[in-house]
Amino acid sequence: MPIFEFRCLECGNIFEKLFIKTGEEVIIECPKCKSPSFERVISRTNYVMGSGKGGSKPKVTTKSCSSGNDCMTLEIPGPDE
């Protein structure tokens, strides 16, 4: 049962929607202003299991990707091959 996050294009409110069944038809609207205009946003993670070799920690890089918007990259260290 995935939970998706959306941002209202009218008021900027970020809200979640739980989808119970695959292919389920639902009406999504902002719970704050009732607008049907929204965009899906990528949920942030706040949990990382363990650390990489030598105690490496995850690295977050933020950059501007368009006017007024920031993009983030999360680099999670893994095992050396």
Image (tube, rainbow, N blue to C red):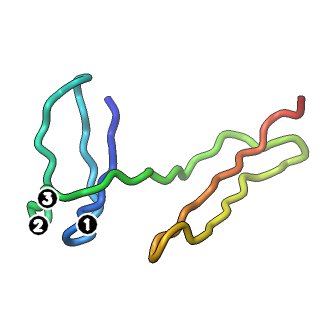
Residue 74 badge: none
Residue 13: percent from the left, percent from the top? 25, 66
Give x and y (percent) for residue 11: 21, 72
Q: Are marks 3 and 1 in contact (CB under 8 Å)?
A: yes
Look at mark 1 in the image and give the residue it sits on. Answer: 13
Q: Nearer the viewer, residue 9 or 66?
A: 66
Q: Quadrant of residue 41?
A: bottom left
Q: Residues within 10 Å of mark 1 (few under 14, many from 20)?
A: some
Q: For the point 22% across and 24% down, which residue is it? A: 23
> Residue placed at 25% from the left, 39% from the top?
18
Asked which secondary structure carries label 3, the reply is loop
| Marked residue nearer the N-terminal end (1 or 2) | 1
Q: Kindly identify which residue carries mark 2.
A: 33
- Kind of residue sitting beneath label 3: Pro
Is 31 on the left-hand or right-hand side of 49?
left
Measured as percent of width and height from the top left, residue 65 is found at 54, 66
Q: Looking at the picture, how far across and down is residue 22, in whole percent?
A: 26, 23
**Left or right: 28 with respect to 57?**
left
Quadrant the C terminus occupies: top right
Q: In which quadrant is the N terminus drawn?
A: top left
- Name the residue tied to disc 3: 31
Few, some or many residues within 10 Å of mark 3 (<14, 14–19, 20+): few
Q: Residue at x 46, y 75 (%)?
A: 67
Residue 11 vs 3, above or below: the answer is: below
Do the residues under discs 1 and 2 have CB atoms within 8 angstroms? Answer: yes
Q: What amino acid type should be assigned to the residue bearing mark 1?
A: Asn
